[in-house]
Amino acid sequence: MKELEPQKQFQIAQVAATMAIEDMPVDSQTYEILTQIATGEKTAEQAVSEARKEYGHV
């Protein structure tokens, strides 16, 4: 996995904080997905598609 730039780390922290405010704390799997999106390893659309397949919402 690529090293995260400080700005990307900040953005992920902001997403995690927003989710926590909404009573949806970020687990390690979600953090990994956010990191993959931030580094360009995946697009948000790919992450959503994979989640839908994993949870049966094709």
Image (cartoon, helix red, strand yellow):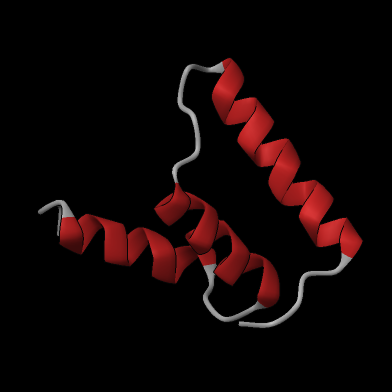
Can you say whether 38 is above or below 22 in the image? below
Residue 5 in picture, x, y percent from top left: 86, 68
Which quadrant of the view contains residue 58? bottom left
Can you say whether 23 is above or below 16 in the image? above
Residue 20 in picture, x, y percent from top left: 57, 24
Taking the spot 53% from the left edge, 53% from the top edge, the residue there is 31
Residue 6 as seen in the image, left or right of residue 2: right
Which quadrant of the view contains residue 47? bottom left
Task: From the viewer's side, name the closer residue of 40 and 26.
Answer: 26
Q: How many marks?
A: 0
Residue 25 in picture, x, y percent from top left: 49, 29
Taking the spot 62% from the left edge, 37% from the top edge, the residue there is 16
Outermost residue, right side:
6
Residue 53 in picture, x, y percent from top left: 18, 63
Residue 17 as seen in the image, left or right of residue 4: left
Residue 51 as seen in the image, left or right of residue 20: left
